[in-house]
Image (cartoon, helix red, strand yellow):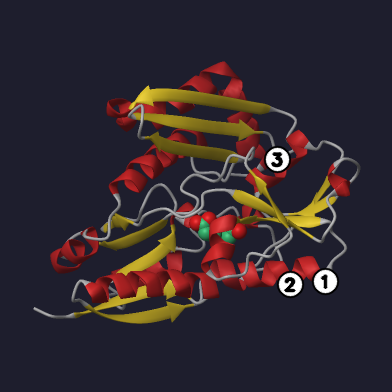
Amino acid sequence: MNKIIRIGTRDSELALWQANTVSKQLNKLGYKTEIIAVKADGDIILDKPLYELGITGIFTKTLDVAMIAGKVDIAVHSMKDVPTALPQSIVQAAVLKRGNVHDILVHKGSTDFLETNGTIASGSLRRKAQWLNKYPNHKVEDLRGNVNTRLQKLKDNSWNAAIFAAAGLERINLKPTEFINLDWMIPAPAQGAMMIVAMENDNYVLDAVAQLNDIETEICTHIERQFLRTLEGGCTAPIGALAIYNEEEDTIVFKGNLLSIDGKQKFEIEKNVPINEWKKLGFFAAKEILENGGEQLMKELRSQLKK
Ligand SMILES: NCc1[nH]cc(CCC(=O)O)c1CC(=O)O
């Protein structure tokens, strides 16, 4: 059999870069591919913050539907945009080796505002909350759109800076010279990783795509998404999570946090556990936060976010 694997993707430059990467890797293994780009609802509605839309999966739904309808065979997503519960019949077929996991602050030459009063831009609840927690005197303005649009909006506005995922800018060669690494900020669960989804009964495609899976990234993102899933209960709360494999010690170093929208409340957890405990690590870390005050905060967040 030599069928063409149709790769579904969003039509932003970053999404197309990611789909092309998957395409090339499959071609190298001898598979034929075709890229099918679609516009996702999350890319069409730009005048509202994402969390106000109260929908998870706004970037992935369009492609889920296309796949169930048989129009594409796989879809390539930024894994952090994929809801923790996949639609029925759709499965995680592979996770590619992760890129840069961190957030960066893109500024305009001077970082003096960090010490005084700054206005920075981000559409992400997680980034907003962590920023305000560290810089309580700053203002955070909303910023939506794909990476290219957001860079342009930063130029056009008087904000001091804006926050981006390093991976997104690096992939499409748009990382400017004026930026600082936000090593202290805990990234979104699965940031910097790409996920391929496919239909659960499509064995030809599942076998093909499985060859692109990176086990270390699969384990780390599993931990982060389990942490998210255990905390969230279906709402888009300010949650960060990062698991890193420490090869020397054969351990997983995990950091996770949960904040209030205004950044005033923060629950944070750090664990270093033997690799063989990875399967439940995200769950236990989330439970610990929930039992130490996080439960109450999640309740408040759910009513604030109307979900
Ligand atoms: N939600 C937007 C989004 N989804 C994935 C990336 C970048 C790639 C990644 O983090 O995996 C971005 C851009 C950003 O957050 O700045």
Q: Is residue 141 visible?
A: no
Element type at marker 1? helix
Image position of 96 (left or right of 235)? left
Label number found at residue 129:
3
Asked if 216 appears above or below 270 in the picture, the reply is: below
Counting other residues with Cα less than 10 Å from the Cα at mark 1, is it few (<14), some (14-19), or many (20 or more)? few
Label number found at residue 152:
2
Q: Quadrant of residue 276?
A: top left
Q: Residue furthest top?
A: 292
Please state the quadrant of the image where ligand 1 appears.
bottom right
- The Cα–Cα distance between marks 2 and 3, rounded to whole angstroms, is 23 Å
Residue annotated with mark 1: 156
Looking at the image, which residue is at 54% across and 46% down?
Answer: 188
Q: Quadrant of residue 222?
A: top left
Element type at marker 3? helix
Asked if 301 appears above or below 36 in the picture, the reply is: above
Amino acid carrying mark 1 in the image: Asp
Counting other residues with Cα less than 10 Å from the Cα at mark 3, is it few (<14), some (14-19), or many (20 or more)? many
Q: Earlier in the sequence, mark 2 or mark 3?
A: 3
- The Cα–Cα distance between marks 2 and 1, rounded to whole angstroms, is 6 Å
Looking at the image, which residue is at 37% across and 58% down?
Answer: 195
Depth check, mark 2 against mark 3: the one in front is: 2
Check whether the beta carbons of the residues at disc 2 and disc 1 lie within 8 A of each other: yes
Check whether the beta carbons of the residues at disc 2 and disc 3 lie within 8 A of each other: no
